[in-house]
Image: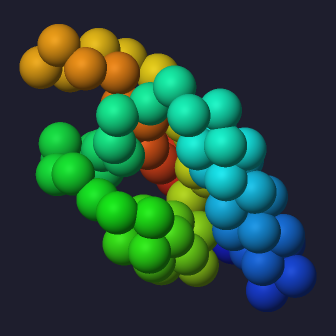
Amino acid sequence: MTLSSSQQEQLWIDAWNDLDDLLAQNQFSFILLPDYVEANLEQAQGWIQSHVYADYKIHFEIAFYKGKKPIFINAKKCS
């Protein structure tokens, strides 16, 4: 399924807002991309935006990794 431009834009704005909300809780050590690469906020936002424009829906998970609690970003192809 291909998303319209407005649907894509709304998805990445929603994902950025969700990430901002998680970071505001100050409970997480860092952000991890799906390939387990640590990312800063700007890198994570860029990754989110590029994947949404490739028709992916973004999901966030909280998991333990190397004894810390990161925000793990994942993407699933829209179907």
The color scheme shown is rainbow
Indicate the quadrant where residue 52 lies.
bottom right
Please state which of residues 37 and 2 is positioned toward the viewer in this rendering. 37
Residue at horizontal 44 percent and vertical 75 percent from the top:
42
Residue at horizontal 50 percent and vertical 45 percent from the top:
76
Left or right of 70, for residue 24: right
Please state which of residues 34 and 31 is positioned toward the viewer in this rendering. 31
Please state which of residues 5 and 11 is positioned toward the viewer in this rendering. 11
Residue 33 % position (x, y): 30, 50
Left or right of 30, for residue 16: right
Left or right of 70, for residue 1: right
Residue at horizontal 45 percent and vertical 64 percent from the top:
41
Left or right of 6, for residue 16: left
Residue 60 % position (x, y): 54, 36
| Total marks in image | 0
Location of the N terminus (image quadrant) = bottom right
Residue at horizontal 35 percent and vertical 34 percent from the top:
29
Farthest residue toward the front?
Answer: 26
Looking at the image, can residue 3 be seen? no
